Structure formats: structure tokens, C-alpha cells
Amino acid sequence: MADQVSAVCEQLIKAVNVMMDAETNQIYRLEALKFYEEFKERNSFCVPCGLQLADKAQPAIVRHFGFQILEHVIKFRWNNMQQQEKVQLKECTMQLLSNGTCSILEEESHIKDVLSRITVEMIKREWPQHWPDMLKEMEALTSQGEAQTELVMLILLRLAEDVITFQTLPAQRRRDIQQTLTQNMESIFSFMIAILQLNVEDYRRLKDVPGQELQARAHCRVAVATLNTLAGYIDWVSLVYITSGNCHLLEILCLLLSESELQLEAAECLLIAVSRKGKLEDRKPFMLLFDDVAIHYILSAAQSADGLALRKKSTDLKAVEVVERRYIFLKRLCQVLCALGGQLFSLVGSDVEVEIPANLSKYMEALLSFTTHSSQFLKSSTQPTWGALFRHETLSKEPVIIDMAIKYLKACMINLVKTGFPSREDNPACEYSRVDFDSDEDFNSFFVSFRAHQGEVVRSACRIVPMEAFQIAAEWLQYQISSPIDIGDTTSKTGEGLCSLLSPSVVQWDAMTIFMECTVAQLFRSQGEEKLPIDRGVELLQVVLNYDTKDPLILSCLLTNISALFPFVVHRPHFLTQVLYKLFKAITFEVGQDSKVPRTRAVKNVRRHACSSIIKICRDYPQIILPCFDMFYNHMKKLFSNDAMLTFMEKCALIEALVLIGNQFKDFAKQKAFLEELMAVVVTEWTSDEMRRVLWDPAMFLSYVGADQVVTEQSTDADTAVVNRGKLSFCLNAMLGVVKRSRWPADLEEAKAGGFVVGYTPAGAPIYRNPCTAQFLLLLPNVLALIRTHNSLFMPENMARLSETFSRAHEVMDAEKNVVLGLSQHPLDFYDSPVYRSSLERMQGFFSTVYDNCFNVLGNVGPSLQQEFYTIERLAEEIAGSAFVSLDHVPDHRLRPMIRVFVRQLVQSCPQEYYNTLLCPLLGPLFAYMQQRLSVKWQVINQRTSVNDEEEEEEVVVCQESQVTQEMLEEQLVRLLTREVMDLLTVSCISRKVPEAAANKEEIDEEEMMMDSVQTSSPAQPTEELSELGKCLMKHENICMSLLTLSFASLSWKDTTNCHRTASMVCWTLLRQVTTGNLLPEAVTWFYTSVLRGLQIHGQHEVCNTTLSQLAMTIYENLRPRYMELRTVMTQIPNISVEALDQYDHRLIDPNAQKAGDKRRKDQFKKLIAGTVGKALCQQFRKEVHIRNLPSLFKKPKADKDVANNEEALGLAALFSPKNNSL
């Protein structure tokens, strides 16, 4: 036998060498791999061969394969091995642990890892029942040397990871091992801490002794392994073990922060410890870390690491680079400080009596040092802690924190400045950014989020020190205005001598502007009128208004400052004309004299920004603007008279602003006359005979907008088409602006006096009339005609009319494509480049915005006109005859805005009395159509992505990248459209009742973390009920079946987000309404199998598995007594236990049967339907590992007698006994 084993081993060694040799031919490598895999599966010599290959005389790579063979035997053959074979393999493994490895410094890490894996696999199968002395054997191993001690630590760590973290074994085995670990935790912890202390002491003693360096490194290696193992346990053991002995463990970890070779691992342990949740009482000992000694160790370690985090490059002594290990240590220390803050905020001010630490200022200084560090990542890590601190009810009133808030705000003057791009060298932060970010785009997206968080924290700090914050902002603004413009080394494409986005002046102005917005907004919220620094604010506003710049990027910041400081104008109205003059000037801003040169995005943004500022002022302060109405209106007429001065978007913005001011007339007749005058041009243009012909005929429409023309550089027709497109866009945007903004007074008495109230509903609510109704009713027929025409543009005959130039005019625009696919957006110089869009891009943009705006108008008209809109004769037929026409040809990306912007708005704003006449005739056919359309689309996607379709796989290999991208885009658009439709269904049919908020989430009993058998108390969930519209829709049989079919069919479409939402909120809420009726058995079977089909596709995802299993159980339990067919479906589930199903059915149907608890029923049902749950692709071809349960460790003794007949007095019975007179 020995000869046979040797011969096989030789073959295996050859196979391993062939596999691992880079020069090997692929065919030979595959043959060698096949031989090796077949040997593992079938050969009876696996154990002796594995042991022989694992001998330390063999090369490391051969040994690793030997260990892998042993691991394979334990994982897949253990259940079929004789007891003697198991014992022998266990003894051999212990022998390998004892003397089967090289010294700790020489042995390869992958050998240590695989040897520890083998041991843990045996422990998982045999401990504690069949291997009770395992822990003692491990302890004995540690006395044999450093190599064995390290292996023991690796074994204990992997055991904790498999059992607690990854839970890679059956529930009973996991429970047995976890309970045994918990019972022995005191000795395990003492053992690990003793090993740590011993090796740290030996390391410190020997590290500086000449000739003892290797021994010192060996002790260091053991200490590192022990710290890593501790980290695997600290996360879940009882807090008692972490805080025992007056926080002895935490003290050790703090001391180790000064050891350069151990500090990172010590910091990891400390971080896990201080991040623990649990009972507040148990977390009190963490406050010891606020003592001077502990804070001193953390601070000095941070300062030391910071000094060593940068070193000079060996290639260029002037340049520096980041030492990654030191930098990671700094990050961990920062996280430790933040976690400590979290404990402080939870404990101070709670029921647990904890005093504010005496040296809180020292802690705050340590936190501030990380906030002012060069690394942007470290700065961002501290933000949540600052936010929680400034919002804390008790701590925020402390003098130390008030002083610190001012220091924090001053630090923000640096932190808000966007610097530190990895590609640049203009800031110390750049070095750290090169470690943290892959590219400038990556850094840019991080900084946007970081700055948003900072803005929130600045607002919180301003609540504490509003006046000081405003003073800092004021000084910063004045400094920026007095500083000369520094364009830096980046050249702008907008014009000579202008800034780019990365120019020093722009990044400073940008940061200051954000700071000013945060502080002024908070100042007006937190201070009474008498305390406001009005004079100072007006003085600042005057400085800003006097400042003149031709740089579009800085002018944009200036406009934001004007908006931020505008509330001061309320107290000094005479400044209003100056503000408006400045804003009007910005609306017509140009860099050069030639207005025909295409403007850069920076210039367009300034003009758009000015328009937005005017709208915002008119919306928020219309009563202040009202006295200037005539000046405003006249200036607008003057601007409108010159077509070249304003784009149609800018004109519409000014119309919108005027309507907002006009609402302050509070006189129906006056507002109506004003709107008629304002919209006269639009009404004339839109209702003209020419426009009617264009809007009602697709061929004429395409010709009018120039989509059927081939465009050349000298094309005059194209210029005419551009003007025509501008007219259409202007009319629609003006309509939208008026419909959105025209309103009656909010005060009922004012509305009555102004003639806006025309009656009352039966419920007593006033019925208002809108001054814009008359104009809108004139415009509506052509809006509906345009929608109908636009839908028909996708029909083949109209697609054929598109010229060669515009053949792709209806495709998804590139920018929208990137958003749908989640691709990175434009480069940083995007706003700096001229808008040289091609004719095709402009046409695509035109079609897209016209379609969107049509539905925007219809979506806003309901809330705006209310009764006057809903009472339009044949409204449902008119809408269905335009918006729902030719939908078969309308692409998915066009359908989304129709559903989201129009139909959803209509559903939300429609009064209940119009449900039957308006919403049911619209929603019924729409849901039926969308169910059929989406089913077909998802069927195509499922066929395309089927793993069994070999032809498809071959096709994918040869298809072009663009083709793959197009398929991804189409699939994602179907997914997004599905979500829009299901969202509409949810909004239409479901109303959620949210219960009162649950208790403090942090107050989790640590036993829940240690013992998985304890039921965690889930927070109260919202309950779903059918809305009034839902009830109305469900009364119509056709609509009812469409809703049910759509909901249940969508469970098996490949979109987990939709599946979870629909299964948890919609399906049962709808189905429950029809269960009392006469549902056909075939329908019930289909609903139930749809849920099981959803489990097959989405069951691999924990969240979907839970919701679908709950839905399946709810349906089964409610309908099984009436529908025997459900049992037939259950019997078809693979590997179902018919006996278990019979028991479940018996308890369900028999009224006298003993009912199981809710959790137990759920577990039983989950086991029944387990065969339907699909596997993830990565799991489908994986060999199953089966671990058998051992005899139970903790059997509950069965009660011998009936509790009800128990003669002994029970506690509760005695308490309420009449004989008990002691109360």
C-alpha cells in the first residue's frame, strides 16, 4: 500500500507542477487539473496521499495541495468515514499542528491558513460532543512554541468567523458551538489576553537586544495574530469580558498604540470594542477612556503616526509619499475617537447617570486635530461626530462645546475649499488623495458628498453660535471681495483671463458662498427680529451689489450670496431696486460683445441662476416685490422686445416670476386681466390655424420642426426650423409656468373677498377658481393634439419621414444614457466648454423636452385648476385619445415621464368624486396594457439572459461592445419603467398606516448579539390598507384582475427592488379584497405559483426571501382551507416532506389541533417551500457541504404533569389569590 501511495503522490506532484507552471500548455494544464479533481472525488488514498504531500520536506505549493486534499476529505467524506478513520485523521492533524510546520517566520501564510481551516472543519463537525477536550488541547499546543500559538489563534479566529460572522453551518450545530463558546468565554478571553501580554512583554524585552531580533519578531507575530483573533471575538461577546478588571483589556490596547508594529491591530480591536451597542448600563465603563491617560495615549499615538505618515520619495527627495500602514492607523484612531464620541452622546443625558468628562476639552482638541488634518478622508470621517455633538441636547450647552463650535466653523473655512485632487500637486491633501481615490472624478464625487455633510454640521453649529458664525461669514465674504482674482495655472476656455472651476479664486468663492448660505439661513431661523444684525447684513449686501465681475463662475457665486442675504431686504425695502437691477443685468450676461457666439455652460448657468434667483425671491417674498411690480413688468417688456437678448427659457422664467407677484393682487378680475395680457402672444400663436395644422398632423409637424430635412452648414431651412422649435418650446414653457404658479390667496377670507370662491363641496370645503383657467381651456385642445401627434411619431410611416440627419432623433440622449447606466458624468471642465451641440443632439433634446413639458403641463393642471379641470366634458376620453394613443410604438424611455409626471400627479390630486368618471376609465386600460407590455419585455430579457441557452452564450462572445451596452440600456429602461408602473399602482391602491416610533435602537440587549436563539424584537411595521381609489378600482372586475395579474406577475421579473416592494406592500392587500368572493381555483393556483416562481428567481436575496415567504404563507394559510389545489401545488415542490406538509395542514385546518407559535409556523413553512428557493449563479455549480447534527447538548426536560392541574401555587396565582391580604 505504501508503494501505491508513493506512486500516486508522484503523479499528484507532477500534476501540481504542470498546473502551476506558467509555461504549461493550456491543454496539459486542464488535463492535470482534471486528474487532480478526479483524485479528490474518487480515490481511496486521499488521506495518506494528502498527509504525504503535506510533509514539510515538500515545496510549499505541493504542501498546500496536500492540505487541500485533506480539507476536501473532511468537508465531503466525513459523514461516510468510520469512527476510527476520523480519530486517526484528527490525531494526524494535531500532529501537523504540533510539528508539521516550519518556524513562525519561515512558514508561508497560506500553509498556516489551510492548516487552521482543516482543524476548524473538524471542530465544526465534532465539537463539543465528540471532542470535549478541544480547548484544552489547543491550550497545550501553545506551550510548544510561537508557531503553534499562532496556529491556535488562527483556529480560534476562523471558528468565530464561521460560526458567528458568516454562519456557514446548520442552525443546531451553530447553536451548540456558540453556546459552548459562550460558556467557556471567560477562560478563552483570559487565555488570549495572557498570550497577548506574555508575547508583548517578550517582544519589548528582546526587540533592542543585539542578536535577538528574530526571536523578537516571532513574539511580535504571535501578538499580531492574538490581536486579530481578539478582534473576531470583541465584536459579539458579552461586554462584561471587554470591560472586566476595570477595563483591563482596553488599557492594554491603549498602551499598544505606541508600539509601531502592533498599533494598527490594537487600534482595530479598540475600534470594535468602543463601537459596541448594548444596554447603556453595560457601556458605562467605556467612559474610562475619557481619562487623561487614555486620551494622552491616543493623542500621542496620533501625533507620532502623523509625523511618520509621509516620507520622502527615494526617487525624488523633494517629493513626499504616504506610508500606507501609518495612514491606515491614523484612520483607525480617528474612527476610535468618533466611536468614543458616540458612546459619550448615548450616555450623557440618558437615564444612566454619567457625568460630563472633566477633560472633555482634551477630547475635543483631539477630534479637531483630525478635522484640520491634510487628508480629506480624515476630515470627512469626523463630520457625523461633530453633527451629533452640536445636536446633543445636553452637551451642546456646555461652554467647552460652544468654544469648540467657533473653532470648528473656522476650520470649515479651509475644509469647504475643494482642494486635494489626486492628479495635482497644489495642496498637501493631494498626497493622501492619491492613496484614497482612483481618479479626479472619484475625488470629485466624494467631495460633493463630504461638502453636503459639512453644510449640515455647519447649520447645526450655527444653532449654537449664530452671531459668531455670521461674523465669520461676513469677514470671509469681505476678504474675498477685497482679494484680487487669481485664475491659477488652469486656463479657461470661456475667455482670456477668466477662471476655470479649479482656479484658486473660484474654489475660495465657492466655499465661502456655501458657508454664507448655511449661516444666514440658520441666523434667521434661530434669532428673533430684535436680535438680527440688520445693519451688518445690509452693509454686506451693499458690498456684494457694488462688486462687479466679468467672470461667470465668480458672478454665479455672487448671485448665490445675494439670494442668501436677501432676507435682510425685508427690513430695508429700499434696497430692492438695486437687487433687481443686479439680477436683471445678470440675466443678459455675456462674456464678450458678440452674442451670436455659442455661450459656454458657465455663461448659460449665470443667466439661468439669475432667473432662478428672481423666481425664488418672487416666490418667498412676493409682498415685498409687489410695490415694484410696474418697474419689473416694464423692464421685462423691454427685454422681450429684443429677441436676441433672451432665450425662450429665460423669457418663461420671467413670466413665471411675474405670475408669482401677480398672485398678490388678490383680485380675481385683475389677475385674470393681467394673465390675459401676459399670455396674449402665447394664446394667439398656439391657437392659430397654422399651429393647429402643425400640431394635428405628424407629417406637417416633422416638416415644421425640420426633422425631415437634411441639414447642411449653409441651410436656411434649418434656421427657420430652429425658430419654429423655439416658438413651440416657448409656448409650452410659458403655459407650464402660468399653470404652476397662478393661484388664489391661501387665506379663505381674502379668497372670498377677491372673488376666487365659487361655491362649496358637500363636505363644506371651498371650491376655488383659478384666474388662468380661461386661457388654459383655450390652449388645452392643441396640447392634447401635440401629445397624440408625438405618440404617433414613433409609428413606422412617420419614422420613415425622418431625414438621414435626424434618423436617430427619438433615441435616448447620451446624458440620459449615462444616468440610466450609472456611468460617470461629465469631466470637471464641462462647464467651461462652449455648447457646440450637433443638429441631431439639439433635435433629440427638443423632442424629449417637448414631450416631458406636455405631460408636466397636464400633471400640474389638476392641482392648479381643480374642479374647473375635472369637470371638463369628456375629459377621460380626451386624455385617453391623446396620451394613450399608439403606445405600442412609444419607446420605454418616453413612457416613463408620462406615468411619473402626468398619471401619478393626476391620481394624487384628483378629488374622490371623480374617481369613477375620470380615473377608472384611464387607469383600467393603462394597467392592462402595461401588464401585457411588460410581460413580453421581461420574457425577452429572461430568454436573453438564460444560462442554458448555448446559442445565446456564443452570440455574446462575438457581439460588439456597443451591442452589449444597448442591451444593458434596454434592460435597465424596462426595469425603470416597471418601477414607475408599480409605483403608480402602489400610489393608486395602497395607503400606509405608520405606527408610533419604536424605542431607542441602540438599546439592544447584548444577549441578542451573543445568542442567536433569542428573538430580536422587530420594530413596529407600517400596515397596508386599500386606499379609497383602490377600493373604487377593485369594484371593476376587469381592472381588479389587471391589478392582481400585474402585481403577482411582477414578482418573477428580474428586479429585486420591485419584487420586495410589491410582495411586502401590494400583493396581499389586493388579493385580500377578493378572497371573500368566488375566486376560480385556477386563479388561486396561479397567484400562489407566481409567488413561488418569485422565490425561485429572487429567493437567493435575504430580503426578498423573507417577504416572499411571508406572502406565500399568508396566502396558503388564508386560502388552503377552501382550495385543496394549493396542497397539490405544494406537493410539486422539490424535496418537500409530505409528512411535514400533512402536519402543517392538520394544524391549519383542524380547529382542535394545537396551534404553533408565529415564529415556529414561519420556520416550518420556510422548510416546506425551501425547494423552490433559487440559487445565485455563483452557487449553482457549487458542491454542497453537509454537516450532520450531533446529539443535542441542552435538551429541555418535558413537563411530567399538566400545569393547569398543578397543585403547587404558581407565582401569578398566588399574587392574585383572595387569601393574599399582604398587598
Image (tube, rainbow, N blue to C red):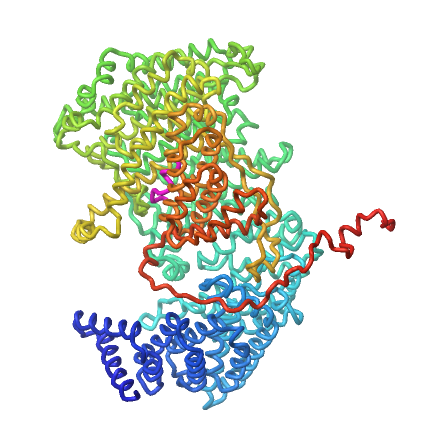
> In the image, is residue 723 above or below residue 1089?
above
Relative to 498, say whether 363 is above or below: below
Q: Depth check: 58 or 900 in front? A: 58
The single residue placed furthest to the right in the displayed view is 1221
Whether residue 423 is visible, yes or no, is: no
Left or right: where 343 falls relative to 601: right
The prevailing secondary structure element of the residues shown in magenta is: helix
Task: Name the image quarter holding the N terminus.
Answer: bottom left
Q: Position of residue 411 (x, y in %)?
A: 51, 53
The one of 582 and 517 positioned closer to us in this rendering:
517
What is the quadrant of residue 753 in the picture? top right
Q: Left of 424 or right of it: where is 1118? A: right
Residue 620: % across, % down: 50, 27
Q: Which residues are magenta?
A: 1047-1057
In the image, is residue 1051 part of the stretch drawn in magenta?
yes
Residue at 85% from the left image edge and 50% from the top image edge: 1220
Counting from the top left corner in percent of width and height, residue 990 is at 48, 32
For residue 857: magenta?
Answer: no
The quarter holding residue 930 reads top left
Relative height, residue 1026 to residue 374 (above, below): above
> Which residue is pictured at 57% across the width and 62% down the height?
1010
Visible residue check, residue 731: yes
